[in-house]
Amino acid sequence: MDLLLCTAENAAMTTERDAPLQSTACDRRRAIRALLVIGLVWLSLVRGVVAEDNRADLLAPDERAWLDAHPRILLGVGAEWAPWVIPVGEGRIAGFAVDHLRLLGDKLGIEIGLKAGPWHEMVAAAEERRLDGLTLAAPLPERGDRFLFTEDFHTVHLFLYLRDGDPLPPPGLAGLNGRRVGYLQEVLRERKLLEGQASIEAVPLPSQAALAEALLTGAVDAAIGSYALEYWRASNGVLGFGPKRMLSEGPARLGISIRKDWPELVGILDKGLAAITAEESAVLNRRWFGRADVFSGGSVPTGLSADEKRWIADHPVLRVGIDPTWAPIEFFDEQRRPQGISVAYIRLIAERLGLRLEFVEARSWAAAVAQFHRRQLDLLPAVAATPSRRQRFDLTDPYVSFPAAIFAAADVAYLGGIEALQGKVVAVIESEAVHDWLREQEPKIQLLPVADTPAALRAVARGDAFAFVGNLAATSYYIGASGLTEIKVLGETPFVYRLGMAVHRDEPMLATILQKGLDAIPRYERDAIYNDWISIRYRVEADWGLLLRVAAGAALLLAIVGWWAFSLSREVQRRRRAEAALAELSRGLDQALAERTHELAGANIRLRRLAVDLSLSDEAARARLAGELHDSPMQKLALAQIQVESAARDPDDPETAELLGAGQALLSEAIAELRTLQFDLSPPLLARQGLAAALAWLAESTQARWGIRMTCALDPDLPQPGHEASVILFQCARELVYNLIKHARASRGTIRLQAREGCLELIVEDDGIGFDPNAPQPRPRPDGGFGLHSVRERLALIAGDLAVEPSAPGTRVRIRFPAD
């Protein structure tokens, strides 16, 4: 390669005087390249030695000897478990399990085989020692007499799957009591969890597809499973269900189960697992789970420090205070049970942290805040941040947001913004965020603090307040629940309730723990909580008098609709009869049109065939006329030329010699013109040697006759078109060359025949004056001048097309036609 580079570099030089310098420079470059190659090889050898040394350091000599004595290690894994295991055809598999064992093998310097199949078959094969163990297996006590277990390396969580739109049950498996719950029958862990709930009807199913079908068809009310079911759903584009909640009972730590008689291998694998770094594990999780690495990571929430875990152990109970009348965000229901969005969030976090919650009921939000300041509460789960609150509370990041709106009587004109309330009495909930915002930012508004949202609505309904500014979701809830339809949303505000969780300023560790808990809640669970509470149906007392009036009106309306429906039915029948007659007529017209189209298509085919025959007949007539010119007049003229030449060699007198010389010149000119005419009519090369030879002759004769420097460029190994196509293409080329001679004022031209993308291309180009191909072209004259029009007509016979492309200078005409 260096020799070739140097040869190329030397060839680029221009003088012999520089040759020694070139040789020296080339030698220098060759030496540098050689040094670089040697350096790279050395580095690779060093890295290999270092890697070998590191690998040797990982295992003891007796462990390495054991591996040498057992060179083949084969583990089993369940096949119905994407993305952990993904069959890719021909017995090959991919997925998390494959990549993890490859990484583990690299750490140990060994190759670990993996076989996938139905999980119960893999377990049986491992128990019979046809496999050496199982990967991604839970260390179940039931298998302790047959297997040894490595350290766990992977966590799999269980999810609750519901149909879209189904209400979310209470947290935990206990919330599924009385329901039919499907699960994957091969997963022992899930079967044992459901067996522990006597009120749940467990329904085992053979595959993820069967599990999804049972859930969508209503054969089961819910399903539990790992992220594999969601992966199957997304991979197959199935809609209508999804994971709605992570089950606190479900997390399982998975490791590798090894045959009982190989304890040495357990220690070896544990060393390899310990050598896998957190960064390498994160790469694997991102590759196969994307942003769903929370499904496969450690405990939820992840990243708790040792101090945070100790804090949880020292504070197992949290006292929680909520606004008793702020539905659907938080409230106490008729049985005095805490409910709402914030309650769902804090319960979810508490389940996953192992905390117990005590909800302390207060008369109002202001009373709950007072209890918090007296340290009777540890946590307020729904607090909007304000400057004053940031000084008093330690707040998490917001986890849900709602706008604040202006509510007023329905007969009030639309207010627009907050500035419309200046000088008016406005109800606000005491100690709520809006109370602080308006007091600090809108001093011209007269504030009327009330205990809760229902009290604020009553104040507006009585006329005690002109308007109420409050949470849009909560106020809409109570308007619907109380039937106060005379109060509407009549304006917007710049305020937004961005709700986080508040703890005492001297408990920053609790705030950090809660923040990690919030961060661990996936998006679909957040959406499920929101949709569960925002789509609440309101119960309103019935107005029986109004109901009777509505019923009477509905009866009258029903009678009118019935009469209208009867009339409409008669009209529909009449129109259907008319449509049937029209359809029959349309079918007749379609049949006649189809027959006529068939006839026209046949006529078009016959016309095209006739046009081809005419073109071939024209060329045959030209050839016949050329032959007759050659066989009779030209032969006679040639004989006369010979006789005149013979007489001119021995003339009787000079005058006779002069006349014979002039006659001889005229005869030579006549013979040349007739020979040219013969070739113009039909070059014999077209029939004998084909299109390429005829085009070459056309270029040569044009240059000889007209002084235009014409060249002919032909691609090698061109397919030979048929006789008909050759004749038509030669006629087109001849017409284009004649146009070049007559109109282009060119000094140079080219005829090119080439193959491109399954087609043949014939190109005629020149360096003449050119013309605008988009300009309107004159209609063909009766006395000739068809030009490009006649070329296009001929090309249509062989399914060809023509394009005129301006070039600088001149014009390029490109003809394309099928090669076959």
Image: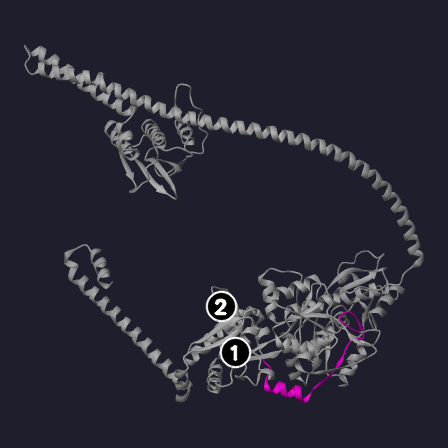
Near-viewer residue (536 or 500)? 536
Q: Report x, y in % for residue 52.
A: 36, 81
Per the image, is 318 magenta? yes
Q: Residue at x 59, y 73 (%)?
A: 295
Near-viewer residue (153 or 178)? 178
**Quarter of the rendering containing residue 429:** bottom right
- Lateral position of residue 637 relative to residue 715, left or right: left
Look at label 1 and name its amino acid. Answer: Ala
Q: Is residue 450 above or below residue 565?
A: below
- Lateral position of residue 457 relative to residue 689, left or right: right
Badge 1 or badge 2: first in the primary sequence: 2
Query: Where are the magenta residues, as a range?
Result: 303-331
**Quarter of the rendering containing residue 659:** top left
- Lateral position of residue 551 relative to residue 46, left or right: right
Q: Report x, y in % for residue 620.
A: 33, 23
Q: Secondary structure at mark 2?
A: strand
- Dot 1: within a 10 Å radius of its alpha carbon, few (fewer than 14), some, or many (20 or more) residues? many
Q: Report x, y in % for residue 542.
A: 90, 61
State the CA–CA distance, disc 1 to disc 2. Answer: 19 Å
Q: Residue at x 51, y 73 (%)?
A: 97
Q: Report x, y in % for residue 527.
A: 68, 67
For the residues labelled 1 and 2, say whether their Cβ atoms are less than 8 Å apart.
Answer: no
Please give the residue where the numbered disc 2 appears in the rendered image: 93
